[in-house]
């Protein structure tokens, strides 16, 4: 960009927009940079909002990383808050801006435009939704309004609609505030980024904290009772629920109105279409963040993943390209994590539901093992699921749920997936080990062992959803100790021979039946499986053991 | 291996040996497996020993993962503890074994032999070292002896010689027991796996916990005072020290005596030479674990890395190959981690000292940033160093020190290094982010940004060791706030202009000098550097900032 032709206008002053502005200034002192933000704040921590509602983040000021003034001091960016861009005039390279304080409108010219307006909470057209007790959470004013409700009224019961990450975080915030909370989710599970059986752990945790968790349940109607300051929620299970406050958190939708009106191309998932340089079909207009579609790392197809990491990096890439430093966004793999009370639930790549839809021929493994050496205090069981392509072994996705060590395993697998690794390469990963931090064979290595055993034909897997209706020629064998069966129950119809007695007692088993072996997590089942097949029996091992089996129903 | 020719004998019953035995049994019910262990225990947690001395692991029984009986029950392995193999007779495929309980010797034949005797603590020939108050720590009897000393006598002062991970863990154990401890290290730093400036953080931590840390100090002589039950240690700094107990932890040496005597090839670092199938030059003898050399991932040359993860995996690979399932060990990258009081120090790949020796043309970056979003409680500063090849950007090594989040960053980088990634690929890693777990731009991404800026010429780096003697045409500029300078000090001769005033005050700076900019960690320095060069000044940015500069002296 020549120095006489260097005015960059940015729409949206938070993750993508502010990152673009900062990087642009670092690349050029000459550029004129104007950043319009509709709201009263720029550079705030969207992701921290629920934690200030819940009280973990005590100071509201901590959520505001930069003010217009501080941003200007450091980056010499003309930051205009409470200024909404209301139209993009591509032909004369201008935006129409409304000063929300005065109501005045004006035109601002640009040489390059960065479009980073984010995504708005979806508010479905449910009867009665337009009422003063229903809230969404996207920004600081939203947060302030919710806190004001909590502080000014005595909320006894609230409902959160939607079990995605914002819904779960708000649920937790209310519980922290001591308010009775109902979580309503239309799907059979919360956190749809993971599969049903992994979500089972989260369901247990949510219920154990006293939340009323309603799965498979839809909000159908709301009636406002002004006198009582309550809402009566009608649910599709014919129940109704009185609440003092309602949070809608069923998802977000890219803010593409301005872009569409200006003739920028919108993709199939409703996000602005961009190339790898974050350019729209108008080469001087760049779009980034929650408002855009990107390339999916696994499929190479378009995807829509509204997360902060991609938004920040895309903003930086847009600035690079505007200022003549060619840069490309690679692809999004949807690495995500959410805290749910004492647990973390994380995922990266594709989940099993998506792979089914994509008709990709995958296999899966479950490993449940300690977050660090079991003999060192504080170890917690991590439940890890890894998905890979059957034919090639290529890693496709991973999910983990635990009280400790989830982020590490997801990040390790996120890198492995990005590097195009195969399941057997997980065996060889050399991860850090000392008793307080890991295990000589980390969970990720174990997942590699289990998956490679399947690929090499060293184990025939059976999965939890195939255990409830065994065929006539199948027999279920539980190789745990009788005490474990007594304490946790067992799969209906299973016979019990503990693994350590199996070699002696194998003759009790029939050779003409297929034996579906299981233990608690799959490890002893594997030992038993290997023993049995080496002794000439037909067998399969339940991958993930009784634990995965039970969680699928939790 | 045919089923009539299937006797596997294993020397050593812990990490490598026991793993080989278990996998061998899972692969074959027919194989006859005999495991000889010199000591009284198999399958124990070597790595947990210091933590039982210190008391964190309360129950001694937790350290013993399998007994000969339980191992036999599950795996039908003939486990013979207190049986030392004293010779390998390759020509007739027999080992000579001594039953240490009875003193009797006998021969045992093998079809395949797994050599997994581990490594022994190095005890240097220092005058007086042979005394009843000097101990090493390798196994449970060693641990019992040390605990017996602690419990039976009132130890007031102990010394640990050697600041490697076992030395550091023992130092911490004594401090936990309330015993005054001196740590003596011959090198200028502890944890030689990281570089001097990273070790600086560890030095601070060690001293802050009241340990007397003596760097650059050698033990030259010991005299035993039987009456007082003390030792007088003479040090090369002419000081002497009276201690009640002495731990020698200066390193370990592969146990290759038997192998050498049997004519197995030994490598330049003193470990048994093996191919990627873990075969020695005798194709029916496999060697694994601390006793062997392996291929280094970075250089492709031989290396010696005595750690539990490689030992476990190598044992499994040996079993695979013995039983006809071809398997290859890839390479070792020396991923390691150690807890030092509240800090973890971790590393993977090559450190700077090694790269210098190897004459590899590397560049380095330092990032000091929060382990998770700074506004969410509990975030700790992680100091991360990443090394990469100058020409190609290929990642060569990483080090991290912090109270939180070290294992995750080291593991992420360990995978990236194994995948052959370059520094710029770190920019694009999509790691899990929610405020309790990470940041929208993780430390690892930041390291990618900083490194790629250097490669692209967007920043000219200067390093901490180049700041103390600026040339005549150089000027040092501190862009922190005056308050920070007051609180932490600054580099001698620096002038101070806070970054947020720099644009206005740039004219105070000369254009004919090279300005060495620095801030606390490097970020504001980068902003200032970009501003200055864009304004036509000559500048460099101190990578890692004042923090790396100070730590190099700590
Ligand atoms: C409660 C909450 C929790 C979250 N937690 C996480 C998390 O844990 N991890 C994670 O990865 N992501 C999380 N996110 C998502 C993350 O915040 C977004 O992905 C990211 O902020 C998107 O960046 P963006 O720049 O596209 O949009 P935003 O950061 O939303 O910024 C867009 C800005 O543009 C402004 N704007 C819109 N239209 C106009 C206009 N016409 N004129 C002027 N200004 C306009 C908006 O007011 C808004 O401030 C969370 C989001 C929320 C709301
Ligand atoms: C105190 C301590 C802490 C450690 N902490 C860590 C850590 O945090 N992380 C990490 O990765 N690694 C750690 N290690 C190293 C790790 O324990 C070793 O790398 C690993 O155990 C090596 O496995 P191996 O099978 O080669 O040898 P070992 O596990 O040592 O097993 C070898 C066995 O062979 C027996 N043996 C030797 N010669 C004979 C013979 N002739 N006949 C019969 N038996 C014989 C020995 O008695 C010994 O029990 C630690 C080690 C120690 C001692
Ligand atoms: C605050 C905000 C404007 C910062 O933008 P930024 O300056 O680009 O980001 P950072 O402060 O992380 O600094 C990154 C820059 O410092 C550099 N840097 C970071 N650490 C460094 C170090 N130790 N040494 C040298 N340079 C360093 C990076 O290379 C990068 O510069 P570059 O882009 O020129 O390569 C922006 O992140 C923001 O608005 N965030 C809040 C909104 C948000 O992200 N919400 C969602 C998450 S809650
Ligand atoms: C105890 C010891 C004998 C265990 O050996 P092991 O049985 O090979 O190891 P594990 O118990 O981890 O089990 C691993 C096996 O279970 C399988 N497995 C693990 N989790 C599984 C799951 N969820 N589902 C199915 N299979 C599973 C693995 O695939 C592997 O089997 P494979 O080798 O046939 O593929 C050995 O590790 C030992 O002696 N350790 C102590 C010494 C030591 O390591 N010291 C240093 C560190 S302190």
Image (cartoon, coloured by chain):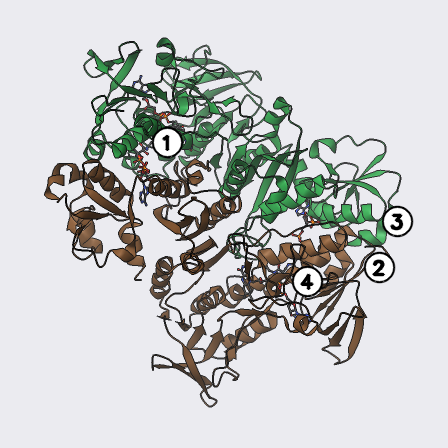
Chain colours: A green, B brown
Quadrant of residue A274 within the rendered picture: top left
> Where is ligand 2, by quadrant?
bottom right
Residue B5's disc number: 2
Residue at 20% across / 17% down in the picture? Answer: A101
Residue B280's disc number: 4
* Camera-nearest residue between A184 and A372: A372
Residues packed near mark 1 inside 10 Å, few (<14), some (14 to 19) or many (20 plus): many
- Give the CA distance from mark 2 to mark 1: 62 Å
Q: Which residue is mark 1?
A: A312
- Give the CA distance from mark 3 to mark 1: 63 Å
Q: Is mark 1 within 8 Å of ligand 3?
A: yes
Picture layout, residue B239 above or below residue A541? below
Badge 3 and badge 1 both on one subunit: yes
Residue at 22% across / 55% down in the picture? Answer: B488
Q: Is residue B506 left or right of residue B134?
A: left
Q: Which residue is mark 3?
A: A507
Q: Secondary structure at mark 1?
A: helix
Q: Is residue B305 left or right of residue A473?
A: left
Residue B466's disc number: none
Residue A167, given in percent of the width and then of the height, sits at 46, 27
* Camera-nearest residue between A423 and A197: A423
Q: Is residue A550 left or right of residue B496?
A: right
Q: Quadrant of the C terminus of chain A?
A: top right
Foreground: disc 2 or disc 1: 2
Q: Secondary structure at mark 4?
A: loop
Badge 1 and badge 4 both on one subunit: no
Q: Is mark 2 within 8 Å of ligand 4?
A: no
């Amino acid at each position: 960009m020549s120095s006489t032709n260097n005015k960059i206008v940015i729409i949206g002053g938070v993750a993508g927009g502010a990152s673009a502005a900062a990087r642009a200034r670092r690349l050029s002192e000459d550029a004129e940079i104007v950043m319009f933000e509709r709201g009263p704040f720029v550079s705030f921590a969207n992701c921290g909002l629920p934690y200030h509602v819940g009280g973990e983040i005590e100071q509201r000021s901590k959520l505001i990383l930069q003010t217009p003034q501080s941003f200007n001091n450091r980056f010499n960016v003309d930051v205009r808050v409470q200024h909404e861009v209301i139209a993009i005039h591509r032909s004369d390279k201008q935006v129409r801006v409304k000063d929300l304080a005065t109501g005045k409108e004006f035109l601002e010219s640009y040489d390059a435009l960065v479009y980073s307006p984010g995504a708005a909470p979806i508010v479905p057209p449910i009867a009665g939704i337009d009422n003063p007790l229903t809230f969404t959470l996207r920004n600081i004013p939203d947060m302030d309004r919710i806190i004001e409700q909590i502080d000014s009224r005595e909320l006894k019961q609230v409902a959160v609609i939607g079990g995605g990450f914002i819904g779960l975080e708000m649920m937790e915030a209310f519980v922290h505030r001591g308010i009775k909370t109902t979580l309503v989710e239309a799907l059979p599970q919360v956190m749809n980024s993971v599969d049903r059986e992994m979500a089972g752990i989260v369901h247990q945790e949510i219920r154990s904290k006293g939340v009323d968790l309603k799965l498979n349940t839809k909000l159908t109607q709301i009636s406002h009772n002004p006198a009582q300051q309550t809402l009566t929620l009608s649910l599709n299970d014919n129940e109704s629920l009185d609440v003092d406050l309602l949070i809608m958190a069923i998802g977000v939708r890219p803010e593409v109105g301005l872009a569409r009106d200006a003739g920028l191309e919108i993709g199939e998932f409703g996000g602005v279409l961009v190339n790898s340089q974050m350019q729209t079909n108008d080469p001087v207009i760049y779009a980034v963040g929650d408002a855009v579609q990107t390339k999916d790392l696994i499929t190479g197809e378009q995807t829509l993943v509204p997360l902060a990491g991609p938004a920040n990096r895309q903003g930086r890439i847009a600035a690079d390209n505007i200022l003549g430093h060619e840069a490309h966004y690679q692809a999004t793999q949807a690495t995500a994590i959410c805290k749910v009370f004492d647990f973390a639930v994380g995922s990266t790549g594709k989940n099993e539901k998506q792979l089914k839809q994509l008709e990709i021929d995958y296999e899966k493994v479950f490993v449940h093992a300690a977050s660090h050496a079991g003999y060192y205090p504080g170890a917690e069981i991590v439940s890890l699921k890894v998905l890979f392509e059957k034919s090639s072994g290529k890693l496709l996705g991973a999910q983990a749920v635990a009280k400790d060590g989830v982020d590490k395993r997801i990040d390790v697998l996120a890198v492995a997936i990005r590097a195009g690794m195969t399941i057997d390469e997980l065996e060889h990963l050399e991860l850090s080990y000392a008793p307080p931090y890991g295990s000589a064979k980390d969970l990720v290595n174990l997942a590699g062992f289990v998956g490679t055993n399947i690929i090499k034909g060293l184990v025939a897997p059976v999965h939890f959803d195939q255990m409830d209706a065994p065929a006539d020629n199948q027999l279920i064998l539980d190789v745990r100790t009788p005490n474990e069966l007594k304490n946790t129950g067992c799969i209906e119809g299973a016979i019990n021979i503990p693994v350590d007695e199996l070699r002696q007692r194998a003759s009790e088993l029939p050779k003409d039946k297929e034996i579906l072996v299981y233990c608690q997590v799959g490890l002893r089942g594997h030992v038993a499986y290997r023993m049995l097949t080496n002794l000439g029996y037909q067998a399969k091992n339940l991958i993930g053991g009784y634990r995965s089996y039970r969680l699928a129903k939790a």
